[in-house]
Every structure is written in C-alpha cells, then in structure tokens.
Image (cartoon, rainbow, N blue to C red):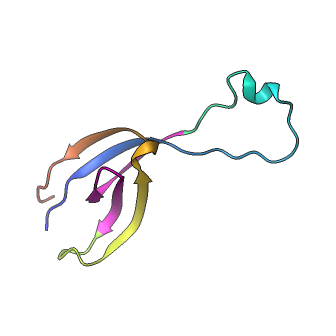
C-alpha cells in the first residue's frame, strides 16, 4: 500500500493558569502556537485529517498518529504522492 506524505501547518489551542489581567487577552492576546507536522495520510475527510508516522505494509496497523480537526488546519502540502520510497 502506498500513501501520500503531507506537511500540515496547524494551529493549536493554548491554555494559561493563574490570574492575569484582562488586558493580556484583549490586546491581541498571546500568540496562537503554529505547528508543522509531516506524515502519511491515513484519513482525509471534510471534518478531519489523520496522519501517521509509520504504517504496516498492508495498512492494518498505524503508529504515532495525529488527528487534526479541519478547523485547526491552515495548510496541507503534499510532500510525496503515493510512491514507493
């Protein structure tokens, strides 16, 4: 089984603990973390993209997956189409 390899740029949620003045959030707030991940496309739907670091040759097993809601994703770039590597 050959799978497409993609680079996904995505925005993550950010949490903060403790007491902070409202100005911290009203004046542009803390920057949203932007992440970049690369992996084999396991699932690609209008709702989500799932990529994995490794997969078994017949596709039954996947290792180290990342499931991203589409609302988190800024950009998906194909690195390699389904070719043998």
Measured as percent of width and height from the top left, residue 18 is found at: 86, 46
Query: Magenta stretch containing residue 15, yes or no?
Result: no
Q: At 34% from the left edge and 62% from the top edge, which residue is drawn?
A: 52
- Farthest residue to the left: give it: 83
* 4 on left or right of 26: left
- Farthest residue to the top: give it: 27
Q: At 59% from the left edge and 45% from the top edge, which residue is drawn?
A: 13
Q: Quadrant of the N terminus?
A: bottom left
Q: Main secondary structure of the magenta part?
A: strand
Which image quadrant for residue 84?
A: bottom left
Measured as percent of width and height from the top left, residue 60 is found at: 25, 78
Foreground pick, 64 / 27: 27
Measured as percent of width and height from the top left, residue 46 is found at: 30, 49
* 16 on left or right of 52: right
Q: Which residues are magenta?
A: 34-54
Image mark count: 0
Q: At 74% from the left edge and 24% from the top edge, which residue is drawn?
A: 26
């Amino acid at each position: 089984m050959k799978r497409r390899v993609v680079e996904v740029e995505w925005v993550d949620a950010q949490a903060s603990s403790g007491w902070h003045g409202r100005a911290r959030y009203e004046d542009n707030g803390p920057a949203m973390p932007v992440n970049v991940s690369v992996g084999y496309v396991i699932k690609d739907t209008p709702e989500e993209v799932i990529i994995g670091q490794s997969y078994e040759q017949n596709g039954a097993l996947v290792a180290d997956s990342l499931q991203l809601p589409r609302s988190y994703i800024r950009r998906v770039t194909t690195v390699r189409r389904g070719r043998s590597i």
